Structures are given as C-alpha cells and as structure tokens.
Image (cartoon, coloured by chain):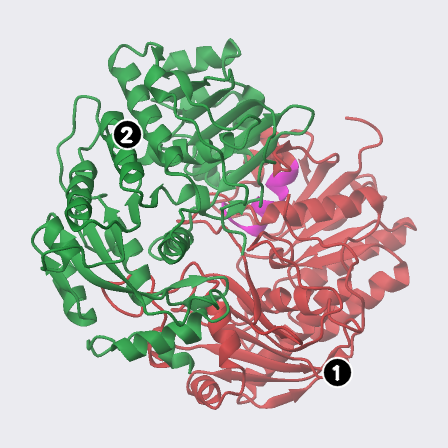
Chain colours: A green, B red
Amino acid sequence: MADNLHHKPNGSHMTFNQITRRTFLASAAALPALAQAPPKKIAIISTIFRLQSHAQHIGDRFIVGYPFAGEWHQPNTQVISLYVDQKPAGDLSEARAKEFGFKVYSTVAEAVCCGGPKLAVDAVLIIGEHGEYPRNEKGQILYPRFEFFQQVAKVFESSGRSVPVYNDKHLSYSFEKAKTMRDTARRLKFPMLAGSSLPVTWRLPDLELPLGCQIEDALMVGAGGSDAMDFHALEALQCMMERRKGGERGVKSVQLIQGDAVWQAGEQGRWSKELLRSALSRSDNLKGATVTDGRTQDMVGTGVLPGLVKDPWAYFIEYRDGTKATMLMLSDAVNDFNIAVKLKGKPEIQATQFFLSPDPNVTYSACLASKIERMIETGVAPYPVERTLLVSGMLESCLDSRVKGNTRIETPHLEVAYQAPRESQYCRI
Amino acid sequence: MSGNRPKLAGITTVYRKYSHTQHIIDRYLEGYGWNGTHHHPEMDLIALYVDQVGQDDLSRDRAARFPAMKIYPTIAEALTCGTGKLAVDGVVVVGEHGDYPKTPKGQVQYPRYRFFEEIVAVFRSSGRSVPMFNDKHLSWNWEWAKKMYDTSKEMGFAYMAGSSLAVTWRIPSVEFPSGAQVREALCICYGGVDSYDFHGLETLQCMVERRKGGETGVKWLQAYRGDKFWEACRANVWPRELMNAALCRSHTLTPARAGFNDIFPSLDDMQRLAKNPVAYRYEHADGLKCTMMLMDGLVRDFNFAAQLQGEPKPFSTQMYLPMPDGRTTMANFFSPLSYNMEKMFLTGKPTYPIERTLLTTGLTAAGVDSLYSGQTRVETPHLAIRYQAPAQSTFWRT
C-alpha cells in the first residue's frame, strides 16, 4: 500500500480512480468527512512554472501531495488547467500537464474555463512570483497578479459563479490594485486567501501570542532589502501584531530609514535594543564572526552591528491604535526571520523564529498548501485576506518613504480593520 | 566573578571551527541564545585541555580573548589549575573530532576513556569528585564504557552524557506520551557507523524510555547493510508504515525525480537514492522492537516514528538539528545540551540518567559488532540496563 503513495514514475498520469483511492487512503485521518467527495478541480494561474518557482512548489502540492502531520497527504484535488505567463529555460509546464493529464492554456480566461465558454474549475491558485518583470522606481517587481486576478474575476462575473481564490504573496505591488482585488472578492462573494508561508510555518519555539494581548513593543529582524523578501517578514510581523487587544484597525504611518540613521534610531530608543537582542537570540544564522569561526554572538551586547551591516533598513510601523512595531533588515548580520515582543504585564520577552526549512523541499510551503486546501474544501478562508491587503499596503508605503527621502508617511488609506482568527493558524502538528 | 559561581574545566580533543568543542566550550565563553535572550552561564570555564592543536586551532584565540580561561598541557594540570589538587567544580569532556586511529572494525578511537581515567585519578588523589559531562557515547569500547559508568557510581559523582538529539527542538514540538505502550519504534537519519548511528539511537531512546514500565534493556541486535537492508525492508522486517511516517517528517527528502522539489519516494526510488543504508534492529527486554536506519542519500535529518497502542496512526516528529555548514551558521542544538549540563553543574544532579547513554553506547558497539561479524544477530545480555525516564521533559521548547 505504501508504494501507492507516490505518482507513477513511468510518466503516465494518474487515473481518476487512482487519485480517489489515494486520496481516501492518504487523507482518511485528516479530512474524514470530505475525503470521499469528488476531487475539486483547480486552475493554476502563474507567471512561470519551473523547478523551485512558487508555482511549481505550491502547485505540485496539489498534484503529487505533500507531507503533513506525519503522513504523505494527497489533497482531494485535481489540477486540470495551467496558465504560465512566461516559459523560461527549465519550464516544466508542458511536461507536468502531459504527465498528469491537464492542459496548459494560452490565456488566463481559457485556463479557468478549461477552453470552454464559462468557469470550469472549483478553485483558482494565482501564483505570480518569479519570472522576468520590470521594476518600478520603488524597486518593486511588477508581477501581474492584479491583471491575473482581474481576468479571473471577469470570468466569474460572466459565468455568474465564483470559486475560492488563493493569491500567493502580496496581492499586488500597488495597494490601490490590492484593494480592488479584495473589494472584488467581497462583491462577488468568493473566499480569498493570500500571503506568505511565514505566518503558517512552524515556530521555534512553538509560540503564539494570546489573543487580546496588549503589545508594548515588537521587533522583527530578518534579511532582505527587497520587496520580495521584506513582504515575508512584514507579514510574519503582522500575523503576530493582529492578535493584540481591540483587533486590527489599520496603520497610521510608516517610515523606512536606512544606513547610520538606523543605529542612531536605536541609540535614541526608537527601536529597542533589548528586543533586538531577544530576536537575534532565536537565530540559527548569525553572520560575521560566526561565519568566520563558528562562535555564538551577542551582537547587541558586543556592539558589532554597525560595523558589520553595510546597508541596514528599519521599517517603522505606527498603527492607528497607537501600537508601534519595528522591522530591521540586517542582511549582513542574520539570515533568518525572528520576532521579539514585549507584552504588558509580562516581564519576559516573547521571541520566536519563523522556521524556513531548507531547499529544495521547502516544507513550509506544505503548511501553506494545507491552508489553501482547507479553503478549497470548506469555502472559508482560514485567515482574513485583509492581513495580506494591509501588509501589501504597508510595504508599498514603506518603499514610498524610501524614495521620498526616508520621510515619515501618513497612511490614511491603510485603515484596514479585521479580527485575527481565533484559532492559531501556524503549523504545530 | 562571584565566589559562588562554579568553576569548570574543559577536557577536549580538538578546538577548531564547527568541532563539538568549539560548539560547547564557546557557549560557556560567549554565551548563547536561550529563552529569548543572550544567556551567559552562571559559571566560569577557567581551565582547558586540548589534546591536538592543529593549524586550524581556535583554543589559543579563545584563551587570548577570554584570559580567565587558561590552557594547560595535561588533563591533571587543567583540573588542578596547576595547584596539585582538584580546583574545579565540574568537568566538560568533549572527545569528538580530531585525528585518532581506527579499530579494525572502523571505530574511531576517541580517547574519552583515557580522559575519564585521568580525570578520576585527580578526583581520587584529591579526595573529592565533581560532576562530569561526557559528550556523545562514553566510549567506542563497551568494556571501557561500563567501567566509566561503574566508576561514576562507585565514586558517587553526577555524570551525564549523550547527544544533542535528545534535547534539541522537535518539529512538531511533541513529547512521547509518558507511560504509552509501544510495540515498534523507528528512526530514519543519516551519517556513518560509530558516528551518527549513536545519534539515531539516542533519538529513539530518549522517546521510548518513557514507555510503560520504563527502560528494561536490550536483548539482541541485528544490523543490516546494503542488499541485506533492502531484502529486510521488502520482507517487512520493520514496519513500512513507520518508515513512511518518519520520512514524512523529513525536511531534507531527496527528490526522487528530476523536476520535483518534494515528492514521496517509492521503495525503488529509496533503493536508488540511498546507496549503502544501514539498519540496527533490536529488541528490548519487554518486547519493544526498535529500528535505527542510516539512509545517506535519502535524508539529512533525524526523524522518529512509533506505533503507540490505541492510536490509529503513527506518532512521529523530527529532532531538529540546525546543521552548519550550509543550512545554518550555528549548531544551536548544542544550546539545549549546554543548558542541561549547566543545570547539573548548578544543582549537582543530572537532568537525565546516564543509563540512557550507557545503553546507546552499548547499542552502538553492538551495531558495529553485528556489521563486522557479517550482519549476524548479536545477543546483548550485557545491555540489561534498567532505568526510569526523567519525570520532566528535557527537550528544547522555550
């Protein structure tokens, strides 16, 4: 039986019966009530599909299954169509389609209609990460997620029917466009899930902030300096911040500063050295002397950071309820994502690492796949798309701050309110 | 430095980048991330002995940067700080890495026993013993290991040993249910014989020792390698279901096919990827059967699975080693190991029993013996080692 848990290695695609049988065997424990339903048909709308691209490693979870809760879980899904915007060297789209019995279509609309006149799938995955796209003056890569989404929504409207949509990473580089996407999902009444794997991956240690906690200060430290990586870190920060008392009510202002001003801000107490020390204490990837001779380091205590980090970035987020959070991108000092939070009434700082497991398995994307699967199965997004909407806007405004001379920017448009899910959503099984 | 702070001596083989000595002794000197801050142990490592000083040695750099730590040319001088009498309150023995000859069976003859004997000679001549930690297994030689254990009992000093695997993060962060009934347990990991096999055995043992009735010892062990491994695997000598569960905890599963990043391998795939696998299968006195598998080429992490009575699916987790070089820059699994040692040095009580490592030391040697004697079954009446698991969990979760 165990050998049935893998796809056929000879290149022939799985039959419907094989999928159903495997699904039942593999997911009987995880989704007992749903396992016997016919598989949900999925369209993947992507920029590129090559090894280690997001479309490949997330999309394949719905094709060959994924490790989850100690078993190889085969979702009760069937990828039946794929759109790829670009076919670079190493493109796998046609090979995958041939092997698993689906088709690569030349337009987004054709993909979600499977070549027919109207919507022909039960869910859409928009995975617009990787590929060759221009950058704007803020340094953002202009991935066409909004354009993909619009074409999908147009088919929903013309078909008089909508299905769940997952959008990988931020909704768009533009808050305006991101908001249109969220508003469209609301208007057409379809569940929408979006964002990064960081909020849902394992945490070291297994730490959740109590819902309704009072956050005195928070600091995220990571490596980045690009809108691609900094989105992940900002969303990880936000998935903790949104659990504070009163729920999320949006962001009042942001500022992104760089260079020596970052250290000066630390000296002036604008960000907490104690929180940075705590966040760095969770890192498995310190740089500098650690790389040279393996030593552990108290980088804050030794004062080594200003000499080590050539281009530090500090993101300051001021929420509408007065709560403040800082994100430090210290790429020359650290190479993972760690948060430290001071809660009111708790003397000890709460700190954890958002665990990014290694290439090529990137098992953290299996954690994300399980959330997408749950939305597809239940029709309810396990956490609100407003989180990703807000973070999309925070990131854009931070980059605006940067191009405007690192000034503070008021963000009245980021009055995005939502409640954190009651149930923790990160992986602990 | 306060007068109440314990003073420690480090007795080591080599001190180079990413050696066990560097990972452990550096944590005493530099501190380390613990409980959400940079923790400095409340003790001072004041004496160091390094058996081999090579081109890549770091001990001189460390002594220069931490002048409170002095390097001594002999173990006795390190323990006495040159006074002729035991002058420390605890001893950290790190006898891993370095250039040592191998036995005909392929075991590296790390001088842990010699270190131990020289240390207890000082204890004896001083009329006083202090707690000791021994990194990894006690010795490659079972007779010596048993003597080390017996000596520690006779002299009555606190003695701890073992691997980081027993105390590191688990993903997910779960503990083996205390008092659970278990028929089969399995670990899939990687690495070499008389090396990482010990880590795999400690991975298993730190879990199954919590079963109903406690540890009862091991009756026999049979090793399988290469073709015999695959024959046994296909004959279901060990449960395939547990293999699958353990592999589904891995974060480093070699993709079985080009073009895929994470795909479950068939048995044929496994056989193609894991070129020369090794399994140690052994039976405890109470009937529990365990299988430790080194599957180089298939995984590069440590994954545990067990079939618990009354549970519909296997219990499984990964013991997470953030391993440099490449995946991380810091071997932070040494942090919980250091922390457990510190607790012993502060309280005089081991946080987990030395009998665990005595047993895994004996299992490692039995595995080597079985492989060396043509993969025959080895009876292990000498491993009738009984002990109770600590009431408190000691793995890293804060």
Residue B248 occupies quadrant = bottom left
Whether marks 1 and 2 lie on the same chain: no
Left or right: A17 with respect to B189? left
Which amino acid is tagged 2? Lys
Is B325 magenta? The answer is no
- Residue placed under numbered mark 2 in the picture: A179
Helix, strand or loop at mark 1: loop
Say if residue A88 shows up in the picture.
no
The residues bearing labels 1 and 2 have C-alpha atoms spaced at a distance of 65 Å
The image shows residue B210 at horizontal and vertical percentages of: 73, 66
Q: Is residue B87 above or below residue B337?
A: above
Image: magenta residue range: B17-28
Q: Is residue B46 above or below residue A372?
A: above
Left or right: B5 with respect to B398? right
Is B24 magenta? The answer is yes
The image shows residue B236 at horizontal and vertical percentages of: 50, 87
- Residue placed under numbered mark 1 in the picture: B285
Q: Is residue A173 above or below residue A312?
A: below
Q: Nearer the viewer, mark 1 or mark 2?
A: 2
Residue name at image x 43 percent, y 58 percent? B251
Q: Nearer the viewer, residue B387 or B123?
A: B387
Q: Nearer the viewer, residue B323 or A17?
A: A17
Helix, strand or loop at mark 2: helix
